[in-house]
């Protein structure tokens, strides 16, 4: 598993600004008002070739009027428990407050590696005020400015020194297939059916599975890891601590997998939560197999119904529609083997390489006959096409004289042609126009 860093501290010390700087996003809302962050934000960062995940927590509050106070404190406690390293952010301008003392006390008890980050050192003169943070008893304070980045290099160098180098999930380079979906869509049941043993607790209560579990599957000449994840559920319904873990772990499982099997409950159809999971799979560029589970509970199963169901799913998940859909039942074991085989096939598709010669033999005449539309009277010529080696998903480069004028609809047209010609079922494809 990757390294997880939690950013903690009292309200308004600049945790979210730091989070945004480290993840190079603007995901966390930053506001002058204390207590803006309620939920834990989750992002990815990289320094000196080491990847790590970051959790931004709400500020730690004690005895405030705020209804969310208890909730936020619980979140911080979870983040501390989950994290490999904790960044304790304090504010140079206001010095040590009772709350800082309170958080420090909890961190000293946690036995986790803790870094004190003295934030808001926006000018060099302020750094001498950071010495008072030695009083917290948590080692050297690192001075930095989350707003302008001053001192962030030294701070990050120190941070990555805590990480262990075993950044890998299972050792061997086996395909990793994650089973994801809303709670109670039947993820554990289908894994039990695959593996042929009851190693996962299955109940009718949504959210029974809390952990991502790796199961080695080695039967019928196939060998891979199955990752069962806890169901991902809507934010509003996430009220227990453990649920928070589940969402984080499910996100991690998607990040750590090659192909995701998205489980959909046949009796409920596609819900907005399924779309969220789908977009997570898309963003992380993973292969996709949609498995419609509990098919045994559906009354009419005519070919027409199946077609209607398939079309509904594809229209909801458009524009990416080239993925397999399998109607299965974990309970009666109907077509579950097909789900496995398809997932392995998608894995192969994701690894598919096409020689430059073959690619151009097909693509160049096609582009000749259907050239990219001229832009402002300029004609666009594509000289040749090549596939990039060693990419996560099949990635093609179009070398052209005016790459900036090749627009998305045309790239989609080429992508569809590629899909028709070669087997890329279930895997995303990337096309990039480049200057020759």
Image (tube, rainbow, N blue to C red):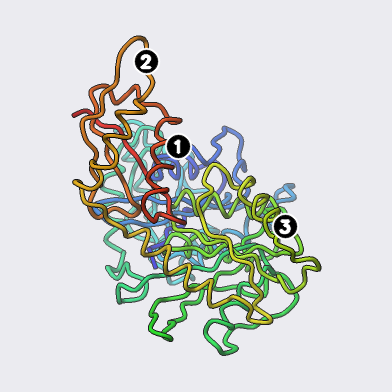
Q: Which residue is mark 1?
A: 93
Q: Residues within 10 Å of mark 1 (few under 14, many from 20)?
A: some
Which numbered disc, 1 or 3, marks the residue closer to the eye?
3
Q: Residue at x 53, y 59 (%)?
A: 324
Q: Taking 35 as reference, is 131 left or right?
A: left
Which numbered disc, 1 or 2, marks the residue closer to the eye?
2
Q: Residues within 10 Å of mark 3 (few under 14, many from 20)?
A: few
Asked if marks 2 and 3 touch (Cβ < 8 Å), the reply is no
Mark toward the start of the polypeptide (1 vs 2): 1
Quadrant of the image for the N terminus?
bottom left
Give the alpha-carbon distance from disc 1 to disc 2, as whole Å.
55 Å
Q: Is residue 91 above or below residue 307?
A: above
Q: Secondary structure at mark 1?
A: loop
Mark toward the start of the polypeptide (1 vs 3): 1
Q: Taking 151 as reference, is 209 left or right?
A: right
Is residue 95 in view from this perspective? Answer: yes
Give the alpha-carbon distance from disc 2 to disc 3, as whole Å.
44 Å
Q: Residue at x 22, y 28 (%)?
A: 435
Residue 297: which quarter of the image?
Answer: bottom right
Q: Nearer the viewer, residue 104 or 297?
A: 297
Q: Secondary structure at mark 3?
A: helix
Q: Which residue is mark 3?
A: 304
Residue 329: which quarter of the image?
Answer: bottom right
Q: Secondary structure at mark 2?
A: loop
Q: Is residue 433 above or below residue 212?
A: above
Q: Which residue is mark 2?
A: 375
Q: Nearer the viewer, residue 141 or 70?
A: 70
Q: Residues within 10 Å of mark 2 (few under 14, many from 20)?
A: few
Asked if marks 1 and 2 touch (Cβ < 8 Å), the reply is no
Which numbered disc, 2 or 3, marks the residue closer to the eye?
3
| Location of residue 125 in the rendering, given as x and y in whole percent from the top left corner | 31, 32
Quadrant of the image for the C terminus?
top left
């Amino acid at each position: 598993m990757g390294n997880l860093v939690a950013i903690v501290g009292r309200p308004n010390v600049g945790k979210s600004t730091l989070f945004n700087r480290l993840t190079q996003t603007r995901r966390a809302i930053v506001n002058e008002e204390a207590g803006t962050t309620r939920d834990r934000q989750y992002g990815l960062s990289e320094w000196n070739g080491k990847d790590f995940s970051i959790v931004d927590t709400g500020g730690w509050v004690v005895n405030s009027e705020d209804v969310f106070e208890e909730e936020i404190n619980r979140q911080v406690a979870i983040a501390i428990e989950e994290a490999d390293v904790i960044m304790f952010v304090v504010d140079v301008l206001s010095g040590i407050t009772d709350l800082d003392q309170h958080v420090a006390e909890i961190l000293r008890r946690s036995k986790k590696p803790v870094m004190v980050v003295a934030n808001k050192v926006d000018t060099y003169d302020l750094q001498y005020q950071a010495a008072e943070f030695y009083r917290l008893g948590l080692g050297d304070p690192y001075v930095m400015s989350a707003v302008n980045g001053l001192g962030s290099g030294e701070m990050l160098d120190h941070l990555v020194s805590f990480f262990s180098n075993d950044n890998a999930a299972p050792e061997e380079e086996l395909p990793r297939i994650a089973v994801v979906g809303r709670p109670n869509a039947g993820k554990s049941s289908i894994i039990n059916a695959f593996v042929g043993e009851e190693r996962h607790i299955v109940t009718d209560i949504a959210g029974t599975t809390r952990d991502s579990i790796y199961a080695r599957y080695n039967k019928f000449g196939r060998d891979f890891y199955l990752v069962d994840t806890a169901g991902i559920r809507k934010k509003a319904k996430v009220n227990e601590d453990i649920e928070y873990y589940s969402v984080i772990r499910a996100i991690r499982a998607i990040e750590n997998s090659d192909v995701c099997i998205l489980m959909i409950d046949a009796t409920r159809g596609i819900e907005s939560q399924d779309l969220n999971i789908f977009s997570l799979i898309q963003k992380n560029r993973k292969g996709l197999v949609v498995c419609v589970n509990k098919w045994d509970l559906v009354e009419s199963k005519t070919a027409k119904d199946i077609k209607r169901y398939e079309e509904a799913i594809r229209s909801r998940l458009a524009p990416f529609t080239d993925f397999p859909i399998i109607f299965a039942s974990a309970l009666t074991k109907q077509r579950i083997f097909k789900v496995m085989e398809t997932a392995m096939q998608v894995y192969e598709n994701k690894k598919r390489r096409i020689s430059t010669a073959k690619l151009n033999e097909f693509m160049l005449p096609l582009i000749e006959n259907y050239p990219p539309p001229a832009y402002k009277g300029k004609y666009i010529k594509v000289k040749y096409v090549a596939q990039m080696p060693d990419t996560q998903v099949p990635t093609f480069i179009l070398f052209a004289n005016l790459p900036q004028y090749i627009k998305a609809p045309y790239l989609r047209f080429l992508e569809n042609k590629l899909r028709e010609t070669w087997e890329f079922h279930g895997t995303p494809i990337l096309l990039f126009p480049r200057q020759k």
